[in-house]
């Protein structure tokens, strides 16, 4: 029997699952009290990590007996349930802008997501970034710069919002893969990384033992189509180089 | 100088661009008066059609001088601007459910989208569907069936909503690629296809002359990674078989 009193957020790997990170950050920012339920990196999470499909298992918010299982749907639900947290901008035009860039993150940047998968424990100095991923990075930087200029910072829409949570895993990728950034963008990234909730998440990720190499077996790698396969092989089979465990949020 | 009085929706191909179709259906369902602006299938649309990236050009709603460029952001904006259209369910729990399945469509079903690209003018009887696309189809059918059972039909959430618009291009794919459906699901599909706005869109698509073969040149095909390439080659290079131009919404 499931209790309808307990609010839970189901997540998988803290180190690898960027959608889990977004959902968790949103829930923390909302101020809702919740318990975190971990599921192992099983078939569904594997598919998510391989970009084969979004998982309907993670993140999943269970609140008052209902399940909300898509990250943007969770954001909208939390915004309705906890309006005092101001997860979305109060101004109607800024709110539309915020949702537009969150939508871009939700459905796009596939080159970045496949070439630079989230891996909070790792560090790859001078990582060679594929040209299509570079285009995604350029677009993301343009999105951030426009927001910071228009709304005056320090967060994308002035106060912290859904948008900062949606892009937080991108910030961690920029560090993991040693992406060169202009000072204004590097400042924003440092602001995100030192936010208490982000720092807490990263600390917990570093304590996790699960290794994606054990999950993505060779045959899984072979079955995957296209560039994502080559990319993950490049990482998981990067002989002789150990991820630097110490660089993040010193 | 752009006038801020005229509301416009920018779309690309009516035949191939499923996101254009969704945006246009949402705008029509909202009751907002708008002019449609067509952009040719250029680099951005090509990238979208190739699943390389979402386009920030289409669909794009320009209203009161602001641009909203992601389909879900457009849906939320229209829902706020035209609450009387009830684009989202009124019940809080149903609304969360609706957003969850719209989010699934927005970021997922990549196998379906790459293997069965929208092509309203075409018909491929007995099309052989790849097993991963079959899994997406099974999930979509389960989503629809649960909604129709829980909310009683005739639309996914009782009254027509954002969800029906988000899944409408999937309905057209089921017809284009001759996907075998149980009667209850076929009934829902027919309801979507005979909705006046959907029928109007499809009629207009059939009148378009643009052919994706002219857009996706051989070298473009070669440059694309993975399964999407094989699939589109299969379609565009389907020697000797002409798409049946007459099957849809007789």
Image: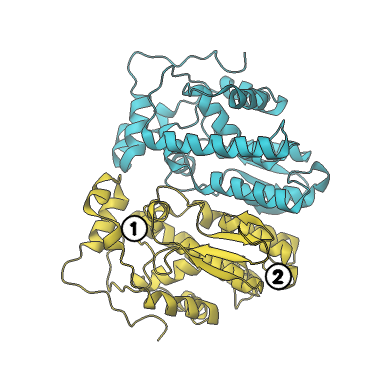
Chain colours: A cyan, B yellow
* Residue B119 in picture, x, y percent from top left: 36, 68
What residue lies at 52% left-to-right and 47% top-to-bottom?
A55
Q: Residues within 10 Å of mark 2 (few under 14, many from 20)?
A: some
What residue lies at 64% left-to-right and 52% top-to-bottom?
A73
Quadrant occupied by the C terminus of chain A: top right
Depicted B173 relative to depicted B221: above or below: below
Depicted B93 relative to depicted B34: above or below: above
Same chain under badges 1 and 2? The reply is yes
Q: Chain of mark 2?
A: B
Q: Is residue A37 left or right of residue A110?
A: right
The residue lying furthest to the front in this view is B1
What residue lies at 59% left-to-right and 68% top-to-bottom?
B26
The residue lying furthest to the left in this view is B240
Numbered label attached to residue B115: 1
Residue tagged by mark 2? B86
Q: Earlier in the sequence, mark 1 or mark 2?
A: 2
Asked if one can make out residue B37 in the rendered structure from this viewpoint, the answer is: yes
Depicted B186 relative to depicted B20: above or below: below
């Amino acid at each position: 029997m499931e209790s309808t009193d307990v609010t839970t957020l189901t997540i998988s790997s803290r180190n690898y699952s960027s959608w889990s990170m977004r959902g968790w950050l949103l829930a923390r920012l909302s101020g809702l009290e919740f318990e975190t339920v971990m599921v192992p990196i099983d078939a569904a999470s594997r598919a998510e990590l391989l970009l084969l499909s979004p998982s309907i298992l993670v993140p999943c918010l269970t609140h008052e007996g209902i399940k909300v299982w898509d990250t943007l749907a969770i954001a909208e639900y939390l915004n309705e349930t906890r309006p005092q947290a101001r997860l979305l901008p109060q101004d109607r035009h800024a709110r539309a802008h915020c949702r537009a860039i969150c939508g871009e993150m939700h459905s796009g940047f596939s080159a970045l997501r496949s070439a630079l998968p989230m891996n909070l424990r790792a560090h790859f100095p001078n990582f060679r970034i594929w040209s299509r991923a570079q285009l995604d990075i350029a677009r993301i930087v343009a999105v951030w710069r426009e927001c910071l200029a228009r709304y005056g910072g320090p967060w994308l829409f002035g106060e912290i919002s859904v948008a900062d949570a949606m892009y937080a895993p991108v910030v961690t990728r920029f560090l993991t893969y040693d992406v060169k950034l202009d000072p204004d963008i590097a400042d924003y990234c440092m602001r995100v990384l030192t936010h208490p909730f982000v720092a807490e998440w990263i600390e917990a990720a570093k304590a996790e033992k699960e290794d994606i190499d054990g999950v993505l077996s060779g045959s899984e790698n072979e079955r995957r189509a296209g560039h994502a396969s080559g990319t993950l092989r490049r990482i998981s089979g990067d002989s002789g180089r150990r991820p630097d465990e110490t660089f993040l949020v010193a």
